[in-house]
Every structure is written in C-alpha cells, then in structure tokens.
Amino acid sequence: MRIPDRFHAIDINSWGLSKSVVALLRHDPELISRLDRVRHQRLFSPQYRPKTIEVFYDDTCWIKSVDGRIVYSEIPSDKSMPTSIEVRFDGEIAMFSIDSETIVDRTTSSVSLLELLGNNISTLAYSKS
C-alpha cells in the first residue's frame, strides 16, 4: 500500500511516545493526520461545558452523554482494556490515548470527565457486571 505524500511530513517520533505506540500509529496514516491537526488546536477553556460527550473504545462508541445525561452506553462485557480511547466534546477530539499513553489532551484540569458526564458513569459501569 502506497502512503500518500502528505503523511510522510508528519514526524510522530517527535511526539514523545513509546516505540510500541509509534508502531501502532504507523498502521493508520489517516489517524496520524487527524491527531496531528488536533494536537495543534487550542485547549478547551475551563468554562467550556460540552453539550455532547462521546467516549470511544477502539473506534466504537461506548458512552454518549447529552446535557449531562447518559443517552447511550455499551459497556464491553469482557472488561478488557481497549487499545485506543477517544473522548469527543461536541464532535471534536478532546482526548485520545493508545495503550494508556496520552497523545492528545485538550481538556483543562479544572473539570473532570465524570463531572461533565453528570457523575453517572461509575454507576453505569458497575451496573452491567
């Protein structure tokens, strides 16, 4: 498979990631491009409260919250850790990690994800065991 030239200019080795995460990313040039664009965007302000929050495990929506209320959840039954976790605020990538290494974090430390989800997530996670 030929990788388009626009992906060759992105040096993911300079992102400070482990060799194993870099190796995983190299298999998905489109994701590299998407993450590179997002890494250069500004942080969400501490006052920002997203209307919609979506949490993806390995590209599958795991939970969706609208106005602090969980409207969709699909808890993995096998309890295994996903390779990648992505959190979107109003459709924009807010956080992205692979193998527990953070690649993008546009959030601020003033508000936790649990607060934004309406504190329902921990109850939800344990109710499906």
Image (tube, helix red, strand yellow):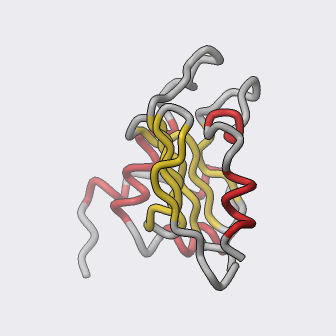
Q: Is residue 54 left or right of residue 95?
A: left
**Image height check: is 67 above or below 33?**
above
- For the view shown, which residue lies furthest in the front direction? 127
Tell me residue 77's x, y (percent). Answer: 62, 81
Figure label count: 0
Q: Residue at x 63, y 32 (%)?
A: 107
- For the view shown, which residue lies furthest in the top direction? 47
**Image height check: is 27 above or below 106?**
below
Q: Is residue 29 left or right of residue 99?
A: left
Tell me residue 127's x, y (percent). Answer: 70, 67
**Image height check: is 66 above or below 77?**
above
Which residue is nearer to you in this view: 10 or 64?
A: 64
In the picture, the quarter occupied by the N terminus is bottom left
Which residue is nearer to you in this view: 101 or 114?
A: 114
Which residue is nearer to you in this view: 68 or 103?
A: 68
Tell me residue 17's x, y (percent). Answer: 68, 59
In the picture, the quarter occupied by the C terminus is bottom right
Q: Residue at x 62, y 69 (%)?
A: 21
Q: Residue at x 40, y 59 (%)?
A: 31
Q: Residue at x 67, y 40 (%)?
A: 113
Q: Residue 28: which quarter of the image?
A: bottom left
Tell me residue 48's x, y (percent). Answer: 55, 19
- For the view shown, which residue lies furthest in the bottom direction? 78
